[in-house]
Amino acid sequence: MLIAIALVALTNVAMAQSKHPQDVQKINAALPTAKITPAQRAQVIKLRNEGEAFHNAGQHGKAEGVLEQAKAILRVR
């Protein structure tokens, strides 16, 4: 049972490690043509930078939250 829990935890970490950089790439790709206000653009950049920092610090739950907020403003999946 403990082995199964450990495997699930490791799988989640591995998925987060690849998903967050992909999210940052999606945000970066969408920013140049996004039809958003300057304030929204600043917010997206702030959220993207925070998400990247959280990811690099191993705080994947926080990274997920802020990157999803940035993607929502840009309307990207």
Image (spheres, rainbow, N blue to C red):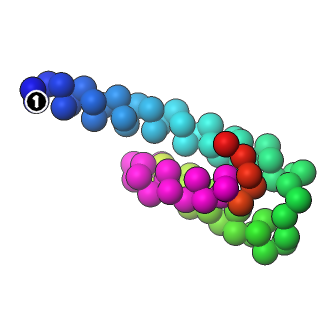
Q: Looking at the figure, which quarter contains the N terminus?
A: top left
With respect to residue 74, does 3 lie above or below? Answer: above
Question: Which of the two residues, 8 or 55, is positioned nearer the viewer here?
Answer: 8
The answer to whether 6 appears left or right of 41 in the picture is left
Q: Which residue in the rendered view is the most extreme toward the left?
A: 1
Secondary structure state at the residue bearing disc 1: helix
Q: Looking at the figure, which quarter contains the C terminus?
A: top right
Q: Where is residue 29 in the image (x, y as percent from the top left)?
A: 79, 43
Within-10-Å neighbours for mark 1: few <14, some 14–19, many 20+: few
Main SS of the magenta part reads helix
Please name the residue shown 84% across and 64% down the image: 36
The answer to whether 7 appears left or right of 48 in the picture is left
Q: Which residue in the rendered view is the most extreme toward the bottom?
A: 39
Kind of residue at badge 1: Leu
User: Could you tell me if residue 60 is visible in this image?
Assistant: yes
**Which residues, given as a range, are shown in magenta?**
56-72
With respect to residue 2, does 35 lie above or below? Answer: below
Please name the residue shown 36% across and 35% down the image: 12
Instruction: Determine if the magenta segment contains residue 64.
Output: yes
With respect to residue 28, does 19 lie above or below? Answer: above
Q: Where is residue 40 in the image (x, y as percent from the top left)?
A: 76, 69
Residue on which disc 1 sits:
2
